Image (tube, grey):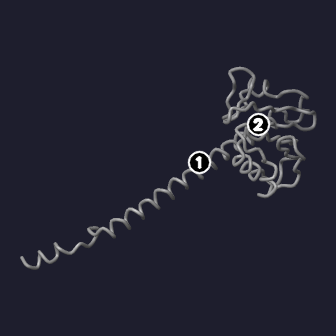
C-alpha cells in the first residue's frame, strides 16, 4: 500500500501541468500544419483541374479539325454541339464557363487557334503557366501582355505575367496549332 501511494503522488505520463501544455502545443502545431497543407493542396488542385480542362479543350479542338483549317470564328458552338468540351461547363447555351465563372473563348484563325481563359486568380494563373509543357503551344499571353514563346515557363516569368491580384483575376490566352 505504501508503494502505491508513492506512485499516485508522482505526476508523470501526461499528469503534470507542463506535460499537458507541451502536448497541447504539439497538437496545435500539427493542426496548423495540416490546415496549411490542405490549403496549399486544394489551391494547387484547382489550378491543376483548370489546366487539365484547358489542355483537354485544346486536344478536342485539334481532334475536331484534324486535317482541315480552323474556322476564323468562335469554336464554342461546334465543340458544344459535338460534345467535345470535356469537364468544362456551359451556360446552357453556346458559352463555355471555367471554374472561376469566366467565359472561355476558343477562337480559330485558319492555321492556329487561341483559347482565352479569364478570371483566373493569381496563384492559379502562376500554377497554370508553369504547367504548360515544353512543346505543343505556340505562345501564351496574360492580360493582353507580351506573348511568352519559351517553354516551359519559369516561376519568375509566370509571376510577372500573372499580375492581377484583384477578384477580377487574370486572363490567359493560349495559342497553338
Q: Is residue 104 left or right of residue 20?
A: right
Q: Is residue 115 above or below residue 10?
A: above
Q: Position of residue 162 (x, y in %)?
A: 78, 47
Q: Which mark is residue 118?
A: 2
Callout 2 environment at 10 Å: few (<14), some (14 to 19), or many (20+)? many
Q: Considering the numbered disc 1 on the image, is that residue within a helix, a strand or a loop?
A: helix
Which residue carries the number 1 mark?
42
Closest to the observer, 107 or 127: 127
Q: Which mark is residue 10?
A: none
Q: Is residue 152 in view from this perspective?
A: no
- Whichever of callouts 2 and 1 sits on the residue coming sooner in the sequence is 1
Q: Position of residue 57 (x, y in %)?
A: 75, 37
Q: Position of residue 9 (x, y in %)?
A: 17, 74
Q: Is residue 96 above or below residue 162?
A: above
The residue located at (90%, 47%) in the rendering is 146
Q: Position of residue 141 (x, y in %)?
A: 85, 44
The residue located at (70%, 46%) in the rendering is 124
Give the quarter of the image for residue 164. top right
Q: Is residue 124 above or below residue 32?
A: above
Q: Considering the numbered disc 2 on the image, is that residue within a helix, a strand or a loop?
A: strand
State which quarter of the image contains the N terminus.
Answer: bottom left
The residue located at (11%, 79%) in the rendering is 3
State which quarter of the image contains the C terminus.
Answer: top right
Q: Residue furthest top?
A: 93
Q: Residue furthest right?
A: 110
Q: Is residue 115 in view from this perspective?
A: yes
Closest to the observer, 8 or 125: 8
Distance of label 2 from label 1 (alpha carbons): 20 Å
Closest to the observer, 90 or 40: 40
Callout 1 environment at 10 Å: few (<14), some (14 to 19), or many (20+)? few
Q: Is residue 124 above or below residue 168?
A: below
Amino acid at each position: 500500500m505504501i508503494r502505491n501511494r508513492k506512485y499516485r503522488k508522482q505526476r508523470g505520463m501526461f499528469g503534470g501541468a507542463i506535460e499537458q501544455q507541451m502536448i497541447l502545443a504539439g497538437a496545435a502545431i500539427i493542426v496548423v500544419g495540416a490546415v496549411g497543407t490542405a490549403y496549399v493542396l486544394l489551391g494547387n488542385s484547382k489550378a491543376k483541374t483548370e489546366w487539365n480542362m484547358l489542355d483537354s479543350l485544346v486536344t478536342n479542338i485539334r481532334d475536331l479539325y484534324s486535317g482541315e483549317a480552323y474556322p476564323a470564328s468562335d469554336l464554342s458552338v461546334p465543340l458544344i454541339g459535338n460534345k467535345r468540351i470535356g469537364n468544362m461547363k456551359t451556360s446552357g447555351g453556346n458559352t463555355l464557363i471555367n471554374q472561376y465563372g469566366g467565359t472561355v473563348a476558343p477562337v480559330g484563325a485558319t492555321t492556329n487557334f487561341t483559347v482565352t481563359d479569364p478570371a483566373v486568380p493569381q496563384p492559379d494563373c502562376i500554377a497554370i503557366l508553369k504547367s504548360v509543357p515544353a512543346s505543343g503551344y505556340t505562345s501564351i499571353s496574360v492580360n493582353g501582355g507580351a506573348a511568352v514563346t519559351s517553354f516551359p515557363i519559369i516561376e519568375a516569368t509566370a509571376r510577372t505575367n500573372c499580375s492581377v491580384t484583384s477578384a477580377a483575376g487574370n486572363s490567359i490566352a493560349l495559342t497553338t496549332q
